[in-house]
Amino acid sequence: MVLLEPWCPAFLPQTASVPYDLSPEFIQELFTKHKIDYIIHGDDPCLLPDGTDAYAHAKRLGRFCMVGQGGGPSLCAGTDYRGTRP
């Protein structure tokens, strides 16, 4: 994977099992085990089958960042960014 974002020096490996529903327990594991500071995603909505926000817990903790998708085609459609501070 090519790292395109200078503020995100590491990504979880693609082989890592990352659930779509980011439970409070899994988010805590990201913050402690992987030393991730923020969960970052585009400005497109991520809703679970019951209509709730997949990132609600991270947002309540103040550890969610949203990035704009821009005007052109997405180079990262369907991917989430889970970043750490440099």
Image (cartoon, rainbow, N blue to C red):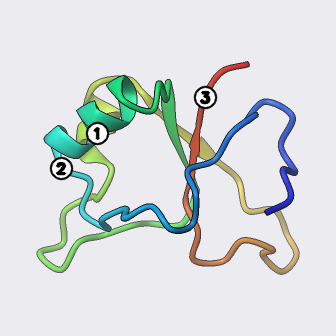
The type of residue carrying mark 3 is Thr
The relative height of residue 47 versus residue 23 in the rendered view (above or below) is below
Q: Nearer the viewer, residue 48 or 6?
A: 6
Left or right, 45 with reference to 5: left
The residue where tag 3 is placed is 84
- Per the rendering, the mark at residue 27 is 1
Quarter of the figure that contains the C terminus: top right
Q: Few, some or many C-alpha atoms within 10 Å of disc 3 (few <14, some 14-19, many ≥20)?
A: some
Contact between labelled residues 3 and 2, with CB atoms less than 8 Å apart: no
Q: Which residue is at a point 63% across and 47% down the rendered structure image?
A: 11
- Per the rendering, the mark at residue 77 is none
Left or right, 69 with reference to 18: right
The type of residue carrying mark 2 is Ser
Left or right, 61 with reference to 83: left
What is the quadrant of residue 7 in the picture? top right
Of pointers 1 and 3, the one earlier in the residue sequence: 1
Q: CA distance from mark 1 to mark 3?
A: 13 Å
Q: CA distance from mark 2 to mark 3?
A: 19 Å
Quarter of the figure that contains the N terminus: bottom right
Residue 21 location (% of width, % of height) = 24, 63
**SS of the residue at dot 1?**
helix
Q: Which residue is at a point 39% across and 67% down the rendered structure image?
A: 46
Contact between labelled residues 3 and 1, with CB atoms less than 8 Å apart: no
Q: Which residue is at a point 81% across and 74% down the rendered structure image?
A: 75
**SS of the residue at dot 3?**
loop
Residue 57 location (% of width, % of height) = 23, 39
- Per the rendering, the mark at residue 23 is 2
Of pointers 2 and 3, the one earlier in the residue sequence: 2
Residue 62 location (% of width, % of height) = 38, 23
The type of residue carrying mark 1 is Ile
